Image: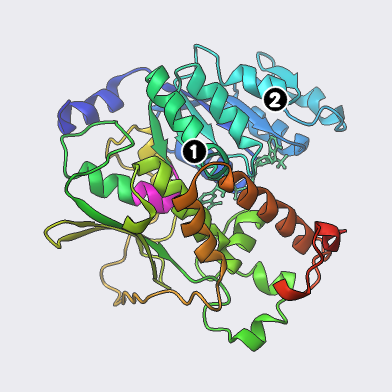
Amino acid sequence: MELTDQKENAENRAPRNIAVIGASGSIGLNALDVIASSRGRLRAGVLTVNRSVSKLVELARRFKPDVIVVADSAVDRSPLTDVPIGTDVLFGSDSIDEVVRRPDIDIVLLSIVGVAGLRVAWNAIDAGQTLALANKEALVAGGSLLMDLLEDRGGKLYPVDSEHSAIFQCLLSRRRAGTTPCIVGRDVERLILTASGGPFRTWSLAQLKNVTVKDALKHPTWNMGSKITIDSASMMNKALEIVEARWLFGLDSERIQVAIHPQSLIHSMVEFVDGAVLAQLSPPDMRLPIQFALDETARLPGSARKFDWKQAFSLDLYPPDFERFPALELGFEVAKNGGSSGVVLNAANEVAVEAFLNNRLIRTTLKELPPYPAFLN
Ligand SMILES: NC(=O)c1ccc[n+]([C@@H]2O[C@H](COP(=O)([O-])OP(=O)(O)OC[C@H]3O[C@@H](n4cnc5c(N)ncnc54)[C@H](OP(=O)(O)O)[C@@H]3O)[C@@H](O)[C@H]2O)c1
């Protein structure tokens, strides 16, 4: 399909029905902003949360979805009396698995946090749905299984993570507008994932021993949920993205690199075998990669911020420091080893981040650790 046809189709067809899985989160709310600004191209047919019932009711009153789901059945249900007529209410994680399979859903936007996303991704792909994937933990823990299932069921997958969307956009520029997400380019030399470096980019090893939760939650360029913000501070986020890129684009870990780019304007790059490098640039705003996925690669006006070309700006790029940010090495190791190593890395990280956020993670060095994770209690 030519790009112009695709654009006209996106503008003229009936609204695409979107299931926003994780509607109360940072990505979910940005996605709802994209839907609200889409001039009728997109509609929210399903909204889900884990426990944020009041927020869900507020969103249901605004977007009038067909169904809403609260994953945690034990929550206080009293706010649900204000759900608009015509919106069904379901409870439990199983109901999320069910709604992503609904035939009236055109695109499942998976924006819940953590490995809970794995089974949702599995169900959506298994049902042959088009999946817009923000949740990176699903690919880290189950990338091999999910990509095999995707191939088998013949569905489509659009990356939403800004780095992977950037790479996808650069790769698409080499092709006629297509939708295949996993492009193993004979022409591609390497993928370069950019990283802001997070709040501790310039901190010394000595300073890093005294970081607080408050320090770690102050991301310099992105406003995101707490788990990914902590992951960005430790650069575990980039480690997870290395694994994510490995599965999405089918390239060996040796052909993936990381570049520190404090301004977060270049969202990632592709180097081709002739030495040419293509990059995707835009202000740091998740609404752009979300819209690109929900519009299935059509370029249409939206609500994402744009550059002010009257302002001077600079682009710095430099290699990462593996000594101060050892998590990065783990990403390369897991991308190389595959198997169940992604499950182990992801599980250890999710437990550690939760413990850190709750001030239960004691500062120590690897040499001081007991043999079992009793230090997390
Ligand atoms: N934020 C970003 O800019 C960004 C960028 C790139 C990639 N990502 C990825 O996108 C995912 C979401 O990130 P986020 O920052 O949007 O997270 P977030 O703000 O913490 O939102 C998480 C959403 O998932 C729901 N949720 C949490 N646990 C759940 C469970 N067990 N079952 C069902 N729903 C659950 C939450 O509902 P409640 O409100 O009820 O808890 C909320 O709606 C993560 O994998 C992250 O790495 C995020």
Q: Give me the C-alpha separation between circle 1 and circle 2.
A: 26 Å
Q: Please say if 116 is above or below 323.
A: above
Question: Which colour scheme appears in the figure?
Answer: rainbow
Q: Is residue 265 left or right of residue 86?
A: left
Q: In terms of image quarters, where does ligand 1 lie?
A: top right
**Outermost left residue:** 274
Q: Nearer the viewer, residue 109 or 209?
A: 209
Q: Is residue 148 left or right of residue 25?
A: left
Question: Residue 339: percent from the left, percent from the top?
Answer: 53, 41
Q: From the Cβ of disc 2, is ligand 1 less than 8 Å away?
A: no
Please provide the residue range marked out in magenta: 160-166
Question: Residue 83: percent from the left, percent from the top?
Answer: 73, 23
Residue 56, picture quadrant: top right
Badge 2 element:
strand
Residue bearing the label numbered 1: 143
Q: Is residue 363 left or right of residue 8?
A: right
Residue bearing the label numbered 2: 69
Residue displayed at 66% across by 36% down:
116
Residue displayed at 55% across by 16% down:
101
Queried whether the magenta region covers residue 115, the answer comes back as: no
Question: Residue 57: percent from the left, percent from the top?
Answer: 72, 31
How crowded pointer 2 is (Cα within 10 Å; few <14, some 14-19, many 20+) is rated as: many
Question: Residue 221: percent from the left, percent from the top?
Answer: 50, 67
At label 2, the amino acid type is Val
Q: Can the viewer see residue 38?
A: no
